[in-house]
Amino acid sequence: MRARDHGITLGRLAPGPFNAITDVAGVRVGHTTLIRGEGPRVVGEGPVRTGVTVVVPHDGEPFLEPLFAGCHRLNGNGELTGLEWVRESGLLTSPIAITNTHSVGVVHDALLAHAVRAHGPHADFWSLPVVGETYDGVLNDINGFHVRPEHLDGALAGAVGGAVAEGAVGGGTGMICHEFKGGIGTASRVVPADAGAFTVGALVQANYGSRELLRIDGVPVGEAIPTSEVPSPWDAAEALARARSGGGRGSLEPGSGSIIVVLATDAPLLPHQCERLAQRAGLGIARMGGIASTGSGDIFVAFATGNRGLPGPEPTPAPRNPVARDVRMLHDARITPLFQAAVEAVEEAIVNALLVAETMSGADGITAHGLDGERAVEIMARFGRGPRARPA
């Protein structure tokens, strides 16, 4: 169940029809989820708890028709490939894929293969796909390299609009968030009509945060469910690492991990405005209790569909591509509602990832417990928040 299924309403703006990144027209999301095996970790065999998620930015061919885009790094202990070209050109020129840390290369290559097919095998072109990662090595045999090109192919082929699967799916399959089970989450917001009625959608792969810092709508839910009551998978992994090393301290600490955020909007934003929008993802994370710890990769990308029809890269200037092209721009004086929408959508997307993800046991029997939505609602009520809060 998602946040609103529990009666938890975050922020002030209204969501779109699906309360998902796909509320931005043309955006599609696809997953390939890989779950197999139980018991002790055997590198190369499993257990496997991983996958791939793709965000297709519009209903055309992303490799041939770019969109204006921008990005932001809150903490850089992670990877989202292709961002130097996004910064340099202001363009997103591929779908966005998210997977585990050690599978970025294979997913990157698989996206390149799609680009080759889009341009034709003899075309003179190059591509810098955007592929992100977070670390699922607590629950998953990450060094077994179980993600294959066909898994990216399947996620792309299955990408659809409408409702988006969340929780332990796709790239989020083996992820942990605030020491509960984490994964994929999404949400959207629509700004008021007098601000343009634009939509902002967010999709997160949430794999960050310590238990005691978790907040939902400002309520310290994490403090009320300590790891002494609901164990942390990070503690179990650390204990196992110490046992295997003869008592030495391992490197697995709660709060490590990462979060990738993808923001989409139908507003006519220019690249520098997309970058400003991407920055606001960090505020949504902060509202949840994220602090961008040194072991966390908190990296965000935002794209805007409000200027469709931009020319794609070509090996030589073509007569059909004019030297100059008119584009639209939202006046900066009207952009603040989009910032609010981004913050609220990211916050709710993380809550959705937490509430939808169910308890999962993975490699070596380590278990990441799902956040009990009813328990969260009860805690929020004690602080005067949420659907069961008593009127003042």
Image (cartoon, rainbow, N blue to C red):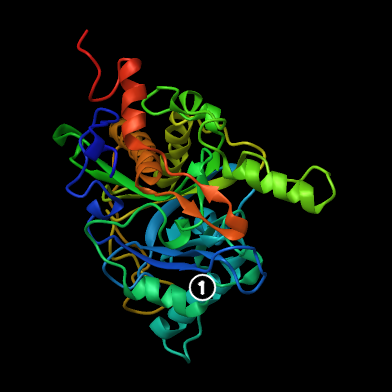
Residue pushed farthest top?
Answer: 392
Of residues 377 and 346, the one nearer the viewer is 377
Of residues 176 and 121, the one nearer the viewer is 176
Element on which disc 1 rests: loop
Residue pushed farthest bottom?
Answer: 122
Instruction: Tell whether 278 sits left or right of 78.
Output: left
Assign the N terminus to one quadrant of the image.
top left
Question: Which residue type carries mark 1?
Answer: Ser
167 relative to 194, above or below: below
Q: Position of residue 214 (x, y in %)?
A: 48, 30
- Kindly identify which residue carries mark 1: 127
Residue visible at 40% across and 64% down in the picture: 54
Of residues 46 and 169, the one nearer the viewer is 46
Residue pushed farthest left?
Answer: 193
| Residue 224 makes an appearance in the image | yes
Instruction: Tell whether 197 sits left or right of 263.
Output: left
229 relative to 183, above or below: above
Q: Examine the image and state in which quarter residue 189 appears.
A: top left
Instruction: Tell whether 285 sits left or right of 258.
Output: left
Residue visible at 46% across and 35% down in the picture: 285
Q: Examine the image and state in which quarter residue 190 appears.
A: top left
Residue visible at 61% across and 74% down in the picture: 45
Q: Position of residue 162 (x, y in %)?
A: 21, 58
74 relative to 158, above or below: above
Q: Position of residue 175 (x, y in %)?
A: 51, 52
Residue visible at 49% across and 58% down in the picture: 89
Q: Position of residue 106 (x, y in %)?
A: 57, 74
Of residues 50 and 243, the one nearer the viewer is 243
